[in-house]
Amino acid sequence: MPTYEYECAKCGHTFEAFQSIKAGPLTKCPECKGRVKRLLSTGGGLLFKGSGFYITDYRSESYKQAAKADVKPPAPAPAATPAAASTPKKAAPKSGKGKAS
């Protein structure tokens, strides 16, 4: 069951109420019996405990050993480059237009 936060429009009193999701919002302030409105709140945070929640829990044994030795793991082999990428581009022809005299 969630905890809802309320604020009184009359006296400004803020309070929390532990209610069912199906329950309707409260309408009266417990202090002055004035009208209350439900506030938007962030709610509780998630707390992950135990193994399996961190990125380091799924690393390979070779990576873990390299990290302990403070050495980077071997980098993956570079992919083969296409022949078109290795050929130099031709220079554009020079024209006589736009020259300063």
Image (cartoon, rainbow, N blue to C red):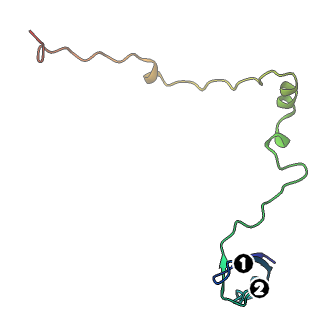
Residue 33's disc is none
In the image, residue 54 sits, relative to residue 98, either above or below, namely: below
CB under 8 Å between discs 1 and 2: yes
Say which residue label 2 marks.
31
Q: How crowded is the residue under tag 1: few (<14 C-alpha within 10 Å), some, or many (20+)? A: some
> Gap in Å between the C-alphas at discs 1 and 2?
7 Å
Position of residue 96 measured from the top left corner of the image (x, y, whole percent): 12, 13
Q: Is residue 90 left or right of residue 3?
A: left
Residue closer to the observer: 94 or 44: 44
Position of residue 40 measured from the top left corner of the image (x, y, whole percent): 65, 72
Quarter of the rendering containing residue 37:
bottom right
Which badge, 1 or 2, comes first in the chain's sequence? 1
In the image, residue 26 sits, relative to residue 78, either above or below, namely: below
Q: Quadrant of the C terminus?
A: top left
Residue closer to the observer: 18 or 80: 18
In the image, residue 34 sits, relative to residue 74, either above or below, namely: below
Kindly identify the amino acid type of the residue bearing the numbered disc 2: Glu
Residue at point 25% right, 18% down?
92
Residue at point 83% right, 42% down?
58
Quick one: which residue is furthest to the left in this view? 101
Quarter of the rendering containing residue 91:
top left
Q: Quadrant of the N terminus?
A: bottom right
In the image, residue 43 sits, relative to residue 32, either above or below, namely: above
Say which residue label 1 marks.
13
Tag 1's secondary structure? loop
Residue closer to the observer: 3 or 70: 3
